[in-house]
């Protein structure tokens, strides 16, 4: 019985492990759904990025990172800038967990 | 009546010449609210051309061409674009966008005996390349079809021409950005040239077509402008001012144009 429970637990956990870790990027200047598509096109080709989910209303991008991949923060920022937006804080975990990001004040160039 | 000057150009014999008169004088009011005034083409005096500057450029044909040219400049990244106004938003780095429009202008109701009717159809195609996220290059290629119907002593005639108009190339550089979550404010500068690629000496059975009916202007015209955009998730405001220096070609100058627009958009879906 204990073996069965362990097996089920491992099977349930497998997709989460395969999906890799999530990285959250604050992006300022995202103000339309189509803009989000343009940003996605810049982020998806980055090495190590498995998936991109954009919450344009909140200004957050969730990057699913391949297991073991070491995603360069500067590459993410460069991709966001190339898409025409302003990168903010980058951190692991859910948006808002990290308190040291710029957070809502806007950023100018 | 129209006759020919020594070099084969249409000669104006009087202000009431129904053929070479401006096609739409007094038909409708231009967008800036001033009464259209006659557009005078080149005067001919014993074969010598006298340069004539249209004082205010009130031919509606010219208005239509200006509208078409400026509207086609508004090729932007895949976001809702204003109909008539430029936007300060720029395409992404490496992105290529091809955008085309179909535009038609029809003017009727001429109270004079000429009973002129004008129809202008145009398909401007804009090609945008994002050199960087801050600097975009544009080429606007218009295809125009102009047709003027009017009464003449010989009966009702149709005059017109179609073909590739004047190509405009310009660069748009984003010089200031202020971004926040769900909003952006941007300021861009525009600079470029309208090239004399369209025919400007087409003729029909009555002689050389009046300049406003030609697909092109024949002149090389620099333009410059400034654009401001404020975009949020729910609405967007664009404002622009574009100045075009229209140079002389064959003794004809259309007069410089300064266009200022303000556009507001409200996004309905998705909210």
Image (cartoon, coloured by chain):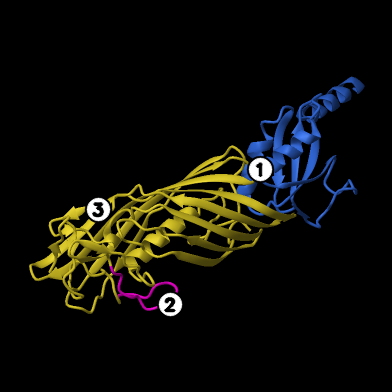
Looking at the image, which residue sits at the far top? A3
Look at the picture and state if B93 lies above or below B175: above
State the CA–CA distance, disc 2 to disc 3: 31 Å
The chain letter under disc 3 is B
B75 or B45, nearer to the observer: B45
Any part of residue A76 in sight: yes
Residue for badge 1: A83
| Residue B32 lies in the magenta stretch | yes
Q: Are marks 2 and 1 on the same chain?
A: no
A35 to the left or right of B260: right
For marks 1 and 3, give the CA distance: 45 Å
Q: Quadrant of residue A20?
A: top right
The chain whose colour is yellow is: B
SS at circle 2? loop
In percent of the image, x 46 and y 58: which residue is there?
B70
Report the magenta residues as a range: B27-40
Question: Of the residues tagged 2 and 1, which is closer to the observer?
Answer: 2
Q: How would you rate the neighbour count of disc 2 (Cα within 10 Å): few for under 14, some for 14-19, many for 20 or more?
A: few
Looking at this view, is B97 or A49 the one in front?
Answer: B97
Residue B201, numbered circle: 3
């Amino acid at each position: 019985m204990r073996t069965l429970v362990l097996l089920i637990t491992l099977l349930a956990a497998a997709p989460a492990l395969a999906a890799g870790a999530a990285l959250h990027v604050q992006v300022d200047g995202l103000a339309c759904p189509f803009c989000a598509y343009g940003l996605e096109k810049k982020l998806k080709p980055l090495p190590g990025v498995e998936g991109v989910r954009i919450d344009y209303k909140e200004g957050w991008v969730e990057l699913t990172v391949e297991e073991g991949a070491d995603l360069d923060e500067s590459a993410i920022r460069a991709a966001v800038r190339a898409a025409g937006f302003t990168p903010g804080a980058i951190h692991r975990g859910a948006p808002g967990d990290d308190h040291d990001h710029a957070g809502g004040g806007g950023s100018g160039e | 009546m129209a006759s020919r000057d020594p070099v084969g150009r249409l000669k104006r014999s009087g202000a009431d010449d129904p053929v070479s008169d401006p096609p739409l004088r007094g038909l409708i009011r231009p967008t800036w609210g001033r009464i259209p005034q006659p557009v005078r083409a080149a005067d001919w005096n014993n074969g010598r051309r006298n340069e004539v500057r249209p004082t205010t450029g009130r031919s509606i044909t010219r208005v239509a061409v200006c509208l078409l040219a400026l509207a086609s400049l508004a090729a932007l990244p895949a976001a809702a674009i204003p109909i008539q106004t430029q936007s300060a938003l720029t395409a992404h780095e490496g992105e290529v966008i091809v955008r085309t429009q179909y535009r038609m202008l029809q003017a009727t109701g001429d109270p004079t005996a000429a009973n002129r009717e004008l129809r202008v159809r145009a398909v401007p195609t804009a090609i945008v390349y994002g050199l960087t996220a801050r600097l975009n290059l544009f080429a606007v290629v218009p295809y125009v079809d102009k047709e003027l119907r009017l009464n003449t002593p010989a009966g009702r005639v149709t005059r017109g021409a179609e073909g590739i108009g004047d190509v405009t190339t310009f660069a748009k550089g984003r010089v200031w950005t202020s971004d926040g979550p769900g909003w952006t404010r941007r300021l861009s500068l525009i600079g470029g040239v309208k090239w004399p690629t369209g025919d400007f000496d087409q003729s029909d059975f009555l002689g050389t077509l009046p300049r406003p009916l030609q697909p092109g202007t024949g002149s090389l015209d620099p333009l410059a402008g400034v654009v401001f955009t404020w975009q949020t998730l729910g609405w967007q405001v664009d404002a622009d001012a574009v100045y075009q220096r229209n140079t002389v070609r064959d003794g004809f100058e259309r007069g410089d144009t300064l266009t200022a627009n303000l556009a507001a958009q409200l996004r309905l879906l998705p909210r």
